Structure formats: C-alpha cells, structure tokens
Image (cartoon, helix red, strand yellow):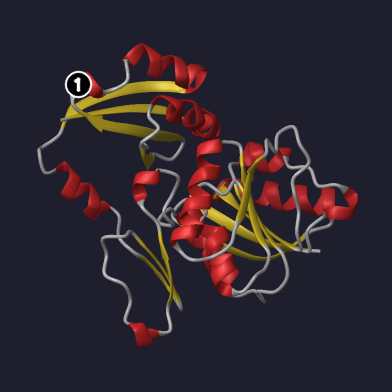
Amino acid sequence: MIRLALRVRREDAEVALAELLALAPSGVEEVDLGDRVEYAIYGPPGELPELPDLQAAAGDALVAVVTTEVEDDWQDRWKQFHQPVELPGLRVRPPWEDPAPADSGTLEIVIDPGQAFGTGGHHTTRLCLELMLDLDPSGEFMDLGCGSGVLAIAAAKLGWSPVAGVDFDPLAVDATIENARVNGVSVAASRVDVKVQAAPSAPTVAANLLRPLLLALHFEPDAVPQTLIASGLLTTEADEIARHFADTYGLVEKRRLTGGEWSALLLTG
C-alpha cells in the first residue's frame, strides 16, 4: 500500500483541496503542518491518481510531494487516528466508535472521516464548537465553509433553526447534506464562492475559514450577523481579524479561545 502526500501552502489549502478531490473523490487525509497542509491518498500504485495530475491540481500552492509505503494494517491505524471529540454535553465521533450511554444526555454527531472534510478533531473546529456551546441557540444559523457539516449539524442539534451551510466545493455541499441526513437533522447546503459573492447571512454565523477568506468575506449592509464565530486562524492572525470585523462591520470581540497554534473569535454587534 502506498501513501502519496502533497504538501501545499496553508493559505492555498482550500483551493488545492477542491482540485485534489476532483481526482480523488473518495477523500484524502488532511494533516496540519503549521504553515503547510498535507493531503494524502492511500492505495495500490496502479489505483492512485497520476502524479503529474496531482501536481497540476495543486498548482502554485505545491510545496512538496512525499511517497511512502505503509503496512497492511494501515486502515486500522488510520481509524485509531480519529478519536471522538468530547465537549460538555456534545460529542463528535466516527461511526465505528461506540455511542455515548443513552442516559448521558450527550448530543452526538457522527461523521465518517472518509468524507475528508473535517471531523471536528482539528483545533479550529473544536474551538468553534466550544464557543457555540456558550451561545443561546435560537433563530437562524449559517455555516460559511461548511466542509463536512460538523458545525451546521451541531447547530441543528443544539436548537438553532433553520440551519444552512455553504461551501466552494460541491463535494463538501454533498457531504454536509448526507451527514445531516445520517444525524437526523435538517441542514440546507449550497455552493457559494465567498471570495466573489456576498456571504449568506443569519443572526448567528460561523466562519471556520482561513485568514484570506475571512478578509474577503462581504456582508450586505442589511445582512451583517449579530453574532459571528471566526476561526481558521493562527494565534498571530487573530488580532488582525478582530480589527477587520470591528472596523468593517462593527462586530466587537467578546471572547477568544486558543488551541495549539490556532484561535477562534466570538464577535458580536
């Protein structure tokens, strides 16, 4: 079994992922390397996408290509890598993990890591979930950059309604719809490019995006959210993003959480 990994610049990661998933629709493994992101594909040599195609898909974002052989038990070890995310009253787990006890009162979200759009384990997603747990879950909720739909599904389970999500990648939109169905909640999802289109809004918005996309977000004057959770940020970028939303939309930082090298901001109008 071969593990073929492409490392790309972090600021170009989302665009590179969208292109790579067109060649590997079954999903890729994502590893955070700080200023770089590694996307890996597993398979027998003859079944992997051609290297030139992968390099072309990554484009100018490409930093390095790494090919390694893996042991035959890689699937079991891959599963061990994806552990449940435990938060007070909320748990995100892969489907092979046992559910929480029925009398625990814990809300559970089940996400298959094979979807490759995030399972809640990354610091930025976890920080968003922590901030959501401290909010009053009422009214509409919008998830900008929904990926696998973790935040949108959590919002629906916590009590926001209606809940919607958007993403640039149509495969992420499909994953969000399917994961919402599996989790028994209603989430509307659609494709939107927030770099060129006004961001769909709601009273509460979560934007777990990278710094360039957060800076590119544009809300119409009559559609600025009352509460915005902004994440996908290195701790060194948080002050800049807080200033940007304060100066542009009058959204003031109320709380900041950090995990590893990452931060999430709670901003309110």
Q: Is residue 101 visible?
A: yes
Quadrant of residue 30 within the rendered picture = top left
Residue type, label 1: Pro
Is residue 131 among what the camera can see? no
Q: Quadrant of residue 20?
A: top left
- Left or right of residue 97: residue 16: right
At which x and y percent is residue 37?
Answer: 42, 35
Query: Given the current orientation, which residue lies at the most extreme bottom position?
Result: 103
Question: Residue 97, position in %: x, y?
Answer: 27, 64
- Residue lying farthest top? 52
Image quadrant containing the N terminus:
top left
Q: Quarter holding the C terminus? A: bottom right
State the residue at coordinates (71%, 53%). Answer: 242
Q: Residue at x 78, y 64 (%)?
A: 226
Q: Nearer the viewer, residue 47 or 84?
A: 47
Viewer-closest of 254 and 152: 152
In the depicted structure, whether residue 227 falls above or below residue 40:
below
For mark 1, give the secondary structure: helix
Q: Within 10 Å of the Cα at label 1, are there few (<14), some (14-19), or many (20+) other Cα atoms?
A: few
Q: Position of residue 229 (x, y in %)?
A: 65, 59
Tell me the residue that label 1 is attached to: 45
In the displayed structure, would residue 138 be above or below residue 53? below
Is residue 153 found left or right of 219 in the rendered image? left
Residue 65 placement (x, y as % from top left) = 32, 21
> Which residue is found at the position 73% from the left and 42% from the top?
217
Total labels drawn: 1
